[in-house]
Image (tube, rainbow, N blue to C red):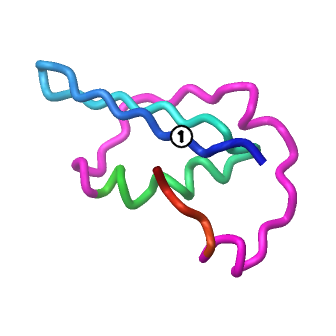
Amino acid sequence: MADEVVDVVIRPDGKVEMHVSGVDGMVCVEHTDQLVSLLGGDVEAQELTAEAYVQAEAETEIDRQNRLWH
């Protein structure tokens, strides 16, 4: 499994850009929900990468609990 990486850029005008890599499927949206809420909670636009369309393997609750964020 590739490393999960979330890059966050806060622009001078206060807008936030977020890019997620290393996550297959739409799980990336779930992984960033809390971060989006902490940053204001309003999503103006969303662009999905090719990784979002890859069928993700089923993830168990133990896998979620053992995930380490860098």
Which region is colored magenta? 38-65
Q: Amino acid at mark 1?
A: Val
- Residue 40 drawn in magenta: yes
In the displayed structure image, the side of residue 37 where residue 15 appears, left or right: left
- Residue pictured at 72% horizontal, 42% vertical: 2
51 over 59 or under it: above or below? above
Q: On the image, numbered disc 1 is attached to which residue?
A: 5
Is the residue marked by circle 1 packed among few (<14), some (14-19), or many (20+) residues within 10 Å?
some
In the displayed structure image, the side of residue 23 where residue 19 appears, left or right: left
Residue 58: quarter of image:
bottom right
- Residue pictured at 54% horizontal, 62% vertical: 68
16 over 13 or under it: above or below? below
- Residue 58 drawn in magenta: yes
Residue 46 in percent (x, y) is at 50, 31
Observer-nearest of 49 and 42: 49
- Residue pictured at 56% horizontal, 57% vertical: 30
Residue 59 in percent (x, y) is at 78, 67
In the displayed structure image, the side of residue 53 where residue 22 appears, left or right: left
